[in-house]
Image (cartoon, grey):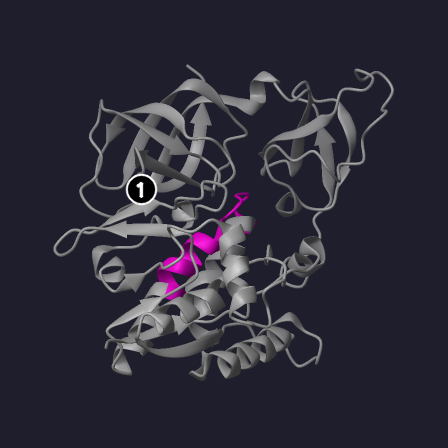
């Protein structure tokens, strides 16, 4: 019987993960990771409620649970990067870094120091193979697959990881939770920032970055409105611009964010979902991370430039230790600097990098 430490978040996925492992006869211990302290003194804050849910889950499952504080690691390794990227005009993906630096580094190190053989989380992904090279695969449930967020894991991390939900569809997970009388069986899935939770995003950023008003302009330089800060907007954004119905614009055609001019503090806006400035044939990525051997230049793969999109056929045009250029069969929509491009060979997640810029050819 192996000792497995499960990261319990207070949600149904991690709870069922722990239940499945206990049913399989493992020695299961739960850990609740506390990684945010800026405003968690209020009784109704999301972190406090999640911890109460974890205690209720542990009682039903009959397992021990430990609260571990990784707030300093989160601030240093994830949140500082998060703010720096927004200040640089990019749109970071904190969940990717959070997995690599907190859930599968700080948490993994803690679990191993407590005698664990492996750690488990409620991610929807699969693992295949053994030492020295294990492969990360997409989950069976394509609607829930989270391999995109795990692409920065290395062999040391995935050799010690378990993803018991990788073969299960989400409805089955909730069904198992109900059968096991797990108290969070109907709890809605979290969609907030990793470990910070769901909250008004603009208000949250204003705590750390001052308002910097500027103009919203068309590519031709026509001023269409005002923005309160470039960091509050991302490429492809449609909602919240407040410039519909402007005189002289195409009536009924929605506006989208197509770019940012940091030097002039201007937000570039265009009309129409398929405007040429929203489409990119190629992109350049840096800060590359590969789970196994890196992909080969000239070979065909598929890739995602954002989590919720179909795999896009592509060819890597050039690659070195830390930079690559990839071109797609069809132009990609709203390729966003700061987000990740993640590559796949069939169901196998190869790894990826952080998007720096894009272009048309």
Q: Quadrant of the C terminus?
A: top left
Q: Residue furthest left?
A: 132
Looking at the picture, tell me which residue is in the foreground, 304 or 74.
304
Residue sitting at x 62%, y 18%: 275
Please count the marks in the image.
1
Q: Which residues are magenta?
A: 87-103
Q: Residue furthest front?
A: 179
Secondary structure beneath label 1:
strand
Whole-percent x, y for residue 206 in the image: 68, 58
310 on left or right of 4: right
Q: Quadrant of residue 285?
A: top left
Residue sitting at x 30%, y 33%: 346
Q: Can residue 195 be seen at all in this image of the molecule?
A: no
191 on left or right of 324: right
Residue sitting at x 60%, y 79%: 52
Q: Quadrant of the N terminus?
A: bottom left
Q: In the rendered view, would you say 71 is above or below 267?
A: below
Q: Can residue 19 be seen at all in this image of the molecule?
A: yes
Magenta-span inclusion, residue 288: no
Looking at the picture, tell me which residue is in the foreground, 83 or 274.
274
Q: Quadrant of residue 148?
A: top left
Whole-percent x, y for residue 62 in the image: 45, 83
- The residue tagged 1 is 349
């Amino acid at each position: 019987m192996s000792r497995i430490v499960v990261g319990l978040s207070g949600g149904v996925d991690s709870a069922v993960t722990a239940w499945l492992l206990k049913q399989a006869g493992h020695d299961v211990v739960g850990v609740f990771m506390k990684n945010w302290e800026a405003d968690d003194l209020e009784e109704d804050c999301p972190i406090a409620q999640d911890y109460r849910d974890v205690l209720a889950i542990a009682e039903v499952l009959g397992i021990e649970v430990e609260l571990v504080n990784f707030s300093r690691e989160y601030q240093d390794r994830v949140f500082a990067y998060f703010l720096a990227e927004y200040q640089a005009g990019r749109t970071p993906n904190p969940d990717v870094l959070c997995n690599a630096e907190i859930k599968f580094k700080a948490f993994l190190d803690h679990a191993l120091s407590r005698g664990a053989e492996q750690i488990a989380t409620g991610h929807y992904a699969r693992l295949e193979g053994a030492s020295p090279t294990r492969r990360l695969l997409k989950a069976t449930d394509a609607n829930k697959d989270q391999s995109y967020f795990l692409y920065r894991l290395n062999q040391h991390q995935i050799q010690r990881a378990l993803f018991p939900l990788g073969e299960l569809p989400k409805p089955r997970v909730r069904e198992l939770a109900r059968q096991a009388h797990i108290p969070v069986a109907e709890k809605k899935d979290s969609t907030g920032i990793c470990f910070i939770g769901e909250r008004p995003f603009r208000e949250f950023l204003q705590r750390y970055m001052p308002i910097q008003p500027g103009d919203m302009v068309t590519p031709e330089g026509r001023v269409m409105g005002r923005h309160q800060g470039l960091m509050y907007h991302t490429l492809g954004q449609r909602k919240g611009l407040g410039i519909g119905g402007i005189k002289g614009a195409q009536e009924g055609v929605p506006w989208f964010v197509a770019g940012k001019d940091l030097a002039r503090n201007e937000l570039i806006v265009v009309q129409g979902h398929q405007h040429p400035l929203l489409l990119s044939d190629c992109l350049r990525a840096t800060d590359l991370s590969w789970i196994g051997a890196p992909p080969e230049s000239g070979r065909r793969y598929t890739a995602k430039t954002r989590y919720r999109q179909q795999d896009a056929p592509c060819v890597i045009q050039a690659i070195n230790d830390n930079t690559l250029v990839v071109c797609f069969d069809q132009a990609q929509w709203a390729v966003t600097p700061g987000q990740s491009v993640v590559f796949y060979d069939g169901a196998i997640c190869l790894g990826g990098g952080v998007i720096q810029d894009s272009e048309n050819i």
